[in-house]
Amino acid sequence: MPFSPIKHAAPSLQGKSPEELPHGLIAPPAEVRALLERERTQHPAEVFAKAELGVLNLWTISYYFDGLGQEVLYRETPQGPEVLAVGSDEVLALRQQIGLDERRDLKTYLGY
Amino acid sequence: MSRLAIPISRQILWATGDVKLWADIVLLVRDGSGRYIDQVFRVDSGTEITTFPAYEAQQLGLVVPVRPAPVQHEPTGLEVRSGMLRFRIDGMDQTEYVVACLLLGDPNAPPSPHASAGTVPRKLLQPLALLEKLRFTMEKVPAGPPYGELVVEKN
């Protein structure tokens, strides 16, 4: 199926400081959900089922943060990623606050 | 554990529909007080030298030379300092590894949010510097992760 370029959120967020970028629970946009459904057809069901939560959350994060160069720490949820920290200062502060075992439940998006 | 399998990530490049693929590894970087702080690096043999943001190195209390080298980092135009990273690999045993790295950017200021994506200092791990102790392979098996995996093993 041919791909139609998608106008995503990241360009409109370019130049904003980390604290101005989205935080908290982010609902996956319709474009991400549509791509996810297309992707589902490309893999065996049991293989994709194991990866689906991670893909949904990663693609939602990338929709908003790709190319901004800001590191993002988030928690995967079935409703979409919960963004806990954006930018090196927030991310390092959070990493120093919580234990390693808890940090292992979190995901990092490098922003590039 | 002496073997780590990292699922490869895949993402659509929204503007064009092209596909980006990568593998990130969690390194437990030893900071200036001896604690290990997890830092995510992109595994990138193309970088030639491991790179790390100078600002974050400063925040972690790593040794950051006061004066930058008399050259610029060509891909980003940023100032460069020579540094070292000591780390364990999260998910593997307690072995500590040491690699030389370039500390990029101003150690006293975070990158500007107005900086273009290409000039942001990146966390890139050059795996070839670790081949004496580690083996890196990439594979895709039918029941494995959908986009394959990067396997890191001790020699």
Image (spheres, rainbow, N blue to C red):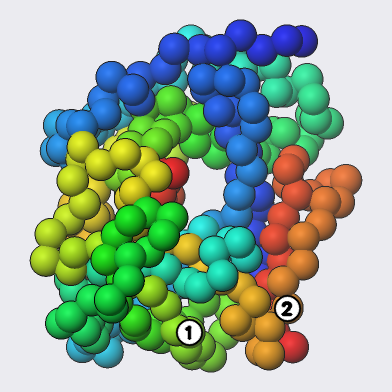
Question: Which mark is drawn over residue B99?
Answer: 1
Residue B42 can be seen in this image: yes
- With B79 as the anchor, is A17 left or right in this view? left
Helix, strand or loop at label 2? It is strand
Which residue type does callout 2 highlight?
Arg
- Residue B54, above or below B83: above
Comparing B70 with B7, the one in front is B70
- Residue B88, above or below A47: below
Q: Residue at x 11, y 66 (%)?
A: B108
- Residue B1, above or below A85: below
Helix, strand or loop at label 1? It is strand
Q: Residue at x 25, y 42 (%)?
A: B115
**Which part of the image, by quadrant, shows the C terminus of chain B?**
bottom right
| Residue to which mark 2 is pinned | B135
Q: Residue at x 61, y 49 (%)?
A: B22
Which residue type does callout 1 highlight?
Val
